[in-house]
Amino acid sequence: MDYLRGRGGKIKELEDELANAKSRCGKLEQEAREHAEAIAQLQAENKASVALKAAALAPASGPGSSAVEHLNRQLDEQLRRALALEQDLASAKQREAVTAQRLSSLQAAADQARVEQAGALAAAGAEAARLRAELEAARADAALAVQRAELAQRVAQRRVEAEQEVLKVTQAQLEELRGAAGALRRELEAAQGAAAAREAEAAALRGSSQVVRLQLLEGELRGAREALARAQAAQGAAAAAGARAGAGAQAGTSPGAQAAAAAAQRGPGPAAGGSAQGAGPSAGRAAAPEAVLPEALRGPWEALCRALAVPPGLSLALAAEEAARAAGALGREAAELRSALSAREEELMQQRAVSSGSEAYAAELQSQLAAARSRLERALTGEKVAERRAAAIEAERDCLRSALQSPTAAAGVANPASLPGQLLAGQRVAALTAEVASSLAAAEAQALAAAAATARAEAADTRIKSLERAADSLAAEERLGRGELIRAGGLRVLHLRHNPEAEARAEEREAATTRLAAENEALRAHVGELEAAAAGLRAALEAAQGSGGAAPPPPPADSSAPSASPPAVPAPALGGGVSLAVKDAEIVVLRRRLEETDKAMSRLKAVFKERITVFREACYSLFGYRVDMTAEATAAADAAGAPTTFTLKPQHADDPSVLLIFRYSGGHMELVPTTFTRERLAREVGTFVTKFNCIPALTANLTMDNFQKQTQC
């Protein structure tokens, strides 16, 4: 049909050209006639002028010679005009001959086209018959396509129903996941409550009665040391007074006082006073230490005995030994309290680690739940799209049925035997074929969409199963981490020896070990101080017991004074060693953290430098400019808004001085004038930057200019 339409158009063109040639031929013939008439008129005028010339030549002399010359000139001009007209007539005849020849060729071509059109009409009839057969085949194919579309629709509907079932199962699994997340959240809250309880227990342990008792004991020991120092000072003053008194004071002593002093030196026994005998043995034993001690030491001694819970009535040596044992017991009790406190702190750290792991697991489950919800929404959207596509397929099927049931009515009233009818029938067949192909493509697309939806549903089901397995494995791993046993044939978790969690735990254990070692050293130093204080008190008591009787004779020289009086007991600030050790441990931990922070910063700097280099090279390759950024030095407070200079070097520039410098300040970019921009880019800068404020247009124009210069060279 296209061939017929093409040949028909060619014939029409030939006929139009033939008509134009005939009209031109008529015009040429009319011009030829006009030229012939003009030539005849000229010939007549020439004859008349020749006659006039002959008549004028008869009287050759006279005043009419000028008129004769004038006539001769007119005759020559008319002759030239006649020759020009003859040449035009010859050329017109030649053009007429060419036009006649072309007209004959056009007539031959028109005859040949008519013959070809007749043959084409015959071929069109055969083609119309073939198209009728193809139309019938197309109808059968359309009916088959309708059946296939119905089958595809039923299959798609079944798949949609299956997908809805899968979505229901997915929603049920999502509800289960929500329940599991809630249970894990409750477990996390319970773990946090247990951690808070452990922290409260640790705080209560820090403020327990033993610690308070130890602090009170330390305060009383400090008071005892101060009292002992005051007693030693008083004893030194008394010894100096006794030395000055001499033997006169000894002679003036009453016999009763001497007897009392002797009784005090001998200690408790039957030689005590009558009141002591009447009081019984227990009263004598209870009063013996107080009788031996000076007045200045009795108060501190009683406070020390009450603090150490020493039973009254013992001798000074036994009381000192008992005090030493009590101090050792208190030191051991303090060490036990410290160890219990450290154990509680370790347990608290474990609880915190478990709670942090539960929080991370809960967050992961929340993210998985959100992902599953988004997948469910996408699946629902796909289901709606599939329903709309199914409705569109049904509508298209109805249209095809209506078109197949009444094909002749849609074809119009044209005669199928005529050429327009055949053309219309061919067009209708092509339209029906295209519609059938489009319906088949839509059905295949719908089938592919249903298959994709089914695949997505299967992938969602697989993902949910994998998430469930991951949740089960994480729960089993958490139970295994808590020390719970797993039944035979159950899951076993393989932990690598070197992993981030193990390294973090090792670092925590090392830091805790360092801190506990420092506290242990501080406690040992504290116990040593307590033992030294007890030994000093014991020595002071023995010295006081030895000097409680008659005053010894004055020493002959000052060199024996230090040996007679006990050395002063140092009184360091109790508890300072513990705080210093803790501070040292914290300093060690902070140094390690600082080293780790420095390493992380160095890695970040290296990565940032590498990425910046990649970004600069990418900008150079993509946009054709190498960018160098320089920030002007300003105060630290204005560092964020400091002016920044950007230097752009073009890629295709042949001169190193070809640079564009821009300054960015306060959210505004401006071009810095240079020799290059003033001399070579003045017009471009004035047009693109000053007038239109478009820096990218300036850079693009410069890039194209440099590229053209390089490629043209």
Image (cartoon, rainbow, N blue to C red):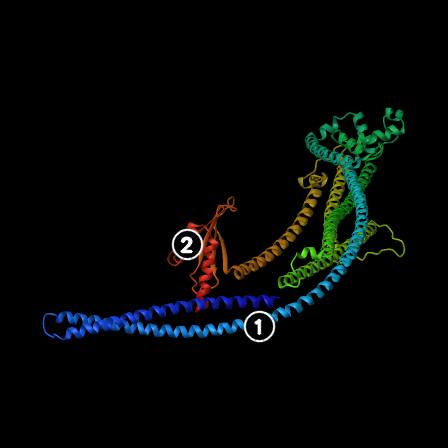
Question: As shown in the figure, which amino acid type bears the numbered disc 1?
Answer: Val
Instruction: Name the residue that disc number 2 marks.
Output: 685
Based on the displayed image, in which of its 4 quarters is residue 192 positioned? top right
> Where in the figure is residue 26, as x and y percent of width and height?
41, 68
Q: Earlier in the sequence, mark 2 or mark 1?
A: 1
Q: Nearer the viewer, residue 41 or 290?
A: 41
Query: How far apart are the alpha carbons under marks 2 and 1?
Result: 71 Å
Q: Position of residue 131 (x, y in %)?
A: 68, 65
Instruction: Look at the image and tell me in which quarter the N terminus lies.
Output: bottom right
Tell me which amino acid carries mark 2.
Val
Judged by depth in the image, the label closer to the viewer, 2 or 1, is 1
Task: Give residue 184's quadrant in the image.
Answer: top right
Q: Is residue 645 shown above or below 236?
A: below
Task: State which quarter of the image contains the C terminus.
Answer: bottom left
- The answer, for residue 692, to whether it is visible in the render is yes
Q: Looking at the image, which is closer to me, 435 or 42? A: 42
**Residue 80 point in image, percent of width and height:** 26, 73
How many numbered callouts? Answer: 2
> What label sits on residue 361 in the rendered view?
none
Q: Kindly identify which residue carries mark 1.
A: 115
| Residue 496 visible in the picture | no
Q: Secondary structure at mark 1?
A: helix
Residue at 78% in and 25% down: 254
> Which one is in front, 19 or 587?
19
Q: Image point 53% across, 59% down: which residue? A: 619
Instruction: Indicate the secondary structure of the residue bearing disc 2.
Output: helix
In this orientation, which residue lies closer to the viewer: 214 or 542? 214
Residue at 54% across, 72% down: 111
